[in-house]
Amino acid sequence: MTPTIADSIYHSLSERIVAGDLPAGEKLRQDHIAREFDTSHVPVREALLRLEAHGLAQSIPRRGTRVTAQDPSEIHEVIEMRVSLEILALTHAVANLTPQDLDAADAARIACDEADNMIVWEKLNRRFHRVILTPCAMPRLLAAIDDLHIASARHLFANWQHRWSRRTDKDHAAIVHAMARRDAAAACEILRRHLRRVR
């Protein structure tokens, strides 16, 4: 499906919010955004509503739409939700795996390991998790997980950016190897441990 202008605006703004380039409290001015993307206010409003739905922005009466502040206590809830939902998705994904799915998972793992800065790594890390879960073929579940990934990403940028260094992710490799063996129990246990490390 071809991305719409609203999709492009939403993705651009959400990435900036996640990375901290648009800080908490920053006003998201419709006219400025419309000029930047050379479009009308209609797709801008649609993108801002999506940011609100995903918890990245808030519309405040007489103050406009602003970037939401992070709640440090939220990360525990986010991680526990990710553990539950990603394990559910991975269980179904392993049952549906094709050789092409395994190739895509391994390529996503390698790309993530080769990232040379945190901004690139974070996008590729999200992509790796999306790729291993997509074969579950449960779009509502995947959409909920995508929202949780955004919340996790904001936490990582806020708290881990100064400590990031390039590394090989052994958990990612172990998950792919377990998937290749069709060992859903092992893949899910590694994923559970991997996600809980974020805390």
Image (cartoon, helix red, strand yellow):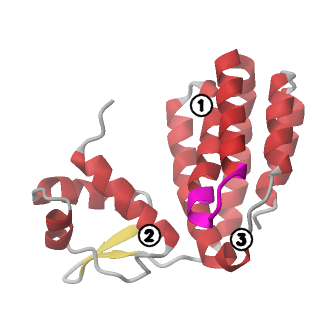
**Amino acid tagged 1:** Thr
Q: Is residue 151 left or right of residue 99?
A: left
Magenta range:
113-122
User: What residue is shown with label 3?
Assistant: 164
> Which labelled disc corresponds to residue 134?
1
Residue 11 is at least partly visible in this image: yes
Q: Nearer the viewer, residue 116 or 14?
A: 116
Could you tell me which quadrant the C terminus lies in? bottom right
Q: Disc 2 vs disc 3: Cβ atoms closer than 8 Å?
A: no
**Amino acid tagged 3:** Trp
User: What residue is shown with label 2?
Assistant: 17
Estimate how packed mark 3 is, as few (under 14), some (14 to 19) or many (20 or more) residues with alpha carbons within 10 Å: few
For the point 71% across and 71% down, which residue is it? 164
Q: Residue 145: x and y, percent?
A: 58, 46
Q: Earlier in the sequence, mark 2 or mark 3?
A: 2
Q: Residue 116: x and y, percent?
A: 65, 61
Which marked residue is nearer to the observer: mark 3 or mark 1? 3
Cα separation between marks 2 and 3: 19 Å
Instruction: For mark 3, give the secondary structure.
Output: loop
Estimate how packed mark 1 is, as few (under 14), some (14 to 19) or many (20 or more) residues with alpha carbons within 10 Å: some
Report which quarter residue 71 is drawn in. Answer: bottom right
Residue 98 is at least partly visible in this image: no
Q: Residue 19: x and y, percent?
A: 51, 70
**Amino acid tagged 2:** Ile
